[in-house]
């Protein structure tokens, strides 16, 4: 049974760290080490780590000056003893079977070094661990997924991926330059894209991550996240010259769509309208659908419509529920085209030995 190193970057994480650590230690896959990188915390983060470490020898920590999440994760990668690394943000939760299912999925490809990692689906949760929504709009794709993840970004967050340690090192770990430029937030997407450009990635099509969204966490700063998303897409559009212009246009459009949504939520109307204008230029169809979504949400608020569903705790939910939800027609169309792009990109990026049989695989590797 391979050792899995769980790397948790933590900065002033006292509010949720206890729950996060408990979910990591409750994994049905027991051969883990939990390495918490205390990134210069000034609150009670340190004492929480020490309390868990005193009761479970699998927990250890490294304390550093505050240098940002990318460098904290890199320090975890460098000090990890496991052949697999699973990243977990200090405010998120894992379903108890997450690591077990991911190891099972990646072990199928143990003899093939072209497979580097495996991701799952996620649900969004609030401050009380209650379910607020499903994070995926696609069913999950596996294999060489560079173009598909570049456009649709379905891996989704920094608590999702389990990756071979040697692959994480081979792609250079996480890039600290985003934080240095004041646009930190999408370092996980940047890492995923560099991984996807070089390796194949597997999917476990179950909702096994609780991704916390609340006022005050990194992802709640919409303006900075929008800038980070746009910069990440721009950098990888330049790095990956072979990605078709159509896919690059779709990726840019999705970045503008995200910026429009978060800026509108923050009531920054003029920047939001500017982002919507760029979305319209990049992808007119997506702009129409986005406008329809905004209007529908506005009508719901006017009528004070509320969901009749009772509140559910993330941990009590069946991880299979919602995995078979229908995929939007426009997303389905894009997936089909992007899957063909990925077959071409894979053949261009790797040797004949790596891509042998690629043409014989199903066109999309996606559950539809």
Image (tube, rainbow, N blue to C red):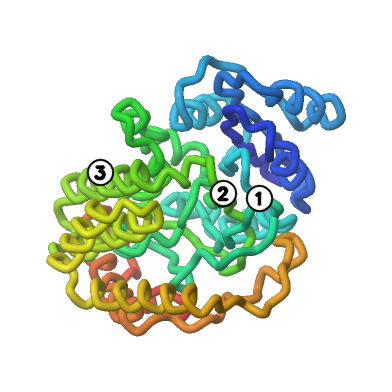
Which image quarter: residue 190? top left
Looking at the image, do the residues carrying marks 1 and 2 touch, with CB atoms under 8 Å apart?
A: yes
Residue 262 position (above or below residue 73): below
Residue 88, given in percent of the width and then of the height, sits at: 59, 42
Q: How many marks?
A: 3
For the residues labelled 1 and 3, the Cα–Cα distance comes to 29 Å
- Picture disc at residue 214: 2
Q: Is residue 321 left or right of residue 258?
A: right
Secondary structure, mark 3, is helix
N-terminal of the pair, mark 1 or mark 2, is 1
Numbered disc in front, either 1 or 3? 1
Task: Say which label, 3 or 2, has the lower sequence index.
Answer: 2
Which numbered marker is on residue 231?
A: 3
Residue at left offset 51%, top offset 32%: 73
Q: At which x and y percent is residue 313?
A: 73, 62
Relative placement, left or right, of 316 versus 37 is: right
Q: Position of residue 152 (x, y in %)?
A: 35, 64
For image coordinates 43% across by 68% down, the residue present is 141
Q: Residue at the location (68% across, 40% down)?
A: 16
Residue at the spot x=43%, y=78% of the render?
A: 299
* Contact (Cβ within 8 Å) of mark 3 with mark 2: no
Where disc 1 sits, the SS reads loop
For disc 1, the marked residue is 127
- Could you say which is closer to the camera, residue 179 or residue 191? 179
Quarter of the picture containing the C terminus is: bottom left
Instruction: Categorize mark 3 by other alpha carbons within 10 Å: few (<14), some (14-19), many (20+).
Output: some
Residue placed most toward the observer, 142 or 65: 65
Marks 3 and 2, how far apart at CA: 24 Å
């Amino acid at each position: 049974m391979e050792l899995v190193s769980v790397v948790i970057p933590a900065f002033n994480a006292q509010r949720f760290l206890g729950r996060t650590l408990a979910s990591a230690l409750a994994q049905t896959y027991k051969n883990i080490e939990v390495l918490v990188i205390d990134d210069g915390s000034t609150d009670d983060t340190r004492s929480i780590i020490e309390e868990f470490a005193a009761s479970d020898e699998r927990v250890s920590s490294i304390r550093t000056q505050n240098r940002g999440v990318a460098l904290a994760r890199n320090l975890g990668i460098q000090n990890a003893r496991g052949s697999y690394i699973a990243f977990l943000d200090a405010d998120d939760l894992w379903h108890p079977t997450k690591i077990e299912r991911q190891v099972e999925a990646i072990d199928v490809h143990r003899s093939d070094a072209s497979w580097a990692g495996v991701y799952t689906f996620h649900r969004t949760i609030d401050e009380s661990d209650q379910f607020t929504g499903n994070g995926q709009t696609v069913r999950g794709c596996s294999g060489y997924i560079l173009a598909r993840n570049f456009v649709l970004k379905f891996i989704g967050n920094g608590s999702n991926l389990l990756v071979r340690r040697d692959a994480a090192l081979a792609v250079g770990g996480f890039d600290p330059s985003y934080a240095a430029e004041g646009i930190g937030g999408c370092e996980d997407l940047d890492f995923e894209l560099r991984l996807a450009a070089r390796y194949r990635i597997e999917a476990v099509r179950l909702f096994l991550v609780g991704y916390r969204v609340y006022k005050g966490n990194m992802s709640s700063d919409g303006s900075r996240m929008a800038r980070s998303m746009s910069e990440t897409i721009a950098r990888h559009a330049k790095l990956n010259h072979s990605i078709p212009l159509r896919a690059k246009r779709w990726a840019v459009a999705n970045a503008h769509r995200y910026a429009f949504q978060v800026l509108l939520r923050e009531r920054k109307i003029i920047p939001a309208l500017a982002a919507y204008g760029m979305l319209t230029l990049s992808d007119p169809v997506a702009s129409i659908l986005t406008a329809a979504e905004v209007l529908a949400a506005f009508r719901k608020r006017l009528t004070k419509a509320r969901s009749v569903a009772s509140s559910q705790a993330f941990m009590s939910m069946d991880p299979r529920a919602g995995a078979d939800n229908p995929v939007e027609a426009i997303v389905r169309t894009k997936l089909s085209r992007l899957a063909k792009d990925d077959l071409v990109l894979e053949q261009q990026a790797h040797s004949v030995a790596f891509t042998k049989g690629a043409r014989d695989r199903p066109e999309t590797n996606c559950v539809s």
